[in-house]
Amino acid sequence: MRLTGSLILSMLLLAACGSNQSGDKATQLKKLKQERSDIDQKISKLEAEVGRNNGAKAIPVSILTLEPQQFVSTINIQASITGDENVLATPQAPGVVKAISVSAGERVSKGQTLATLDASALQQQLQAMDAQLNLAKTLYEKQQKLWAQNIGTQVQLLQSKTQYESLQSQRNALAAQRDMYTIKSPISGVVDAVNIKVGDMASPGTLGIRVLSKDKLKALANLGENYIGKVSQGDVVTLVFPDLNDSFRTKLSYVAQSVDPISRAFNVEVRLGTNNRLHPNMSCKMKIANYENNKALLVPVSIIQNTSDGNIVFIADGNKAKSVKVEIGKTANGMSEILNGLKDGDKIITAGFEDLDDGEPIAIQ
């Protein structure tokens, strides 16, 4: 096939144009690569500058290296010293105080008379009864002698005997009634207070004479029902006496098994026995150790931050801060037990953590 001159010319022009376009694209590609190289260099330079600036602005922090230690969780409550033998002696019948036989600080025995009330009316009845009783006794004894001589009847003997025994019973009843007008010590101990004076009107269960024994002292406290099941008999207890500047380490002697329906609390007590330094009604602080871990990882409560994702603390990871989610156990004395999230040797940030974000540069002080 033969081509015309105009067709050949057109084909040559198209080839020339294609050649020029191809050359332009290659030039553009080369130019873009050069620009990219320049941009990469600028980025690297800026990154280096930013890194130097960040290093200069690192947040100063303080750290604490974690290591296992003993941890004891305690329940701290107010307690008071009392005793099983701490009683207020009062009369069994109301009357006017006639005489007081003891004074505060005096040692007394069980059954000893502490004070006497006016019982003159009963005393007069007793005196009259004694006269009748003596007569009945004499008649009965004479009737016995006559009966021994076969004189008189058995009925007469029985009548005289009955009369005598009846009067004797009446006399004993009057004597017991008179004794109700005396105040006697129900225990052996020391007179702690005399709350009555001669001329006062004394009644059962009101004012009287307090007697106590320091042989059976105990520390008594009340725990809220939320502690049921969290304390047990035998738990280690420390009793702190601020006024004595002293403390005693012992064990819990008794834990009540029921909750008071009104106060919603239950009793716990520590028996102390005899201790001359302690006195009834003294106050003390009772610290019940209800949990112990000899290899606990502890952090200050103040550095634990509560977030929407849970509790976190910051640790030092090289020269950067790292947030770590933690699981908290018991808390006592400003320290919390960490169950999960931290390990032995972790460097926890204890100061400066307030302004930290995860991955932020730090400077350890």
Image (cartoon, rainbow, N blue to C red):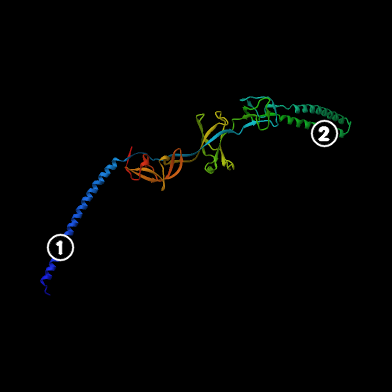
Labels 1 and 2 touching (C-beta < 8 A): no
Which circle's residue, 1 or 2, is located before the other in the chain? 1
Q: Is 250 in front, or is 298?
A: 298
Labelled disc at residue 162:
2
Mark 1 crowdedness (10 Å alpha carbons): few <14, some 14-19, many ≥20 = few
How many marks can you see?
2
Query: Residue at horizontal 18%, vertical 55%?
Result: 31
Q: CA distance from mark 1 to mark 2?
A: 159 Å
Labelled disc at residue 19:
1
Residue 237 pos. (x, y %)? 51, 36
Q: Is residue 231 left or right of residue 343?
A: right
Labelled disc at residue 36:
none
Q: Residue furthest front?
A: 6
Residue 348 shows up from this direction: no
Image quadrant where one finds the N terminus: bottom left
Q: Secondary structure at mark 2?
A: helix
Q: Is residue 163 left or right of residue 33?
A: right
Residue 160 shows up from this direction: yes
Residue 335 pos. (x, y %)? 43, 39
Amino acid at pointer 2 = Thr
Q: In the rendered view, tell whether residue 194 sits above or below residue 2.
A: above
Residue 287 pos. (x, y %)? 51, 36
Q: Disc 1 vs disc 2: which is toward the camera?
A: 1
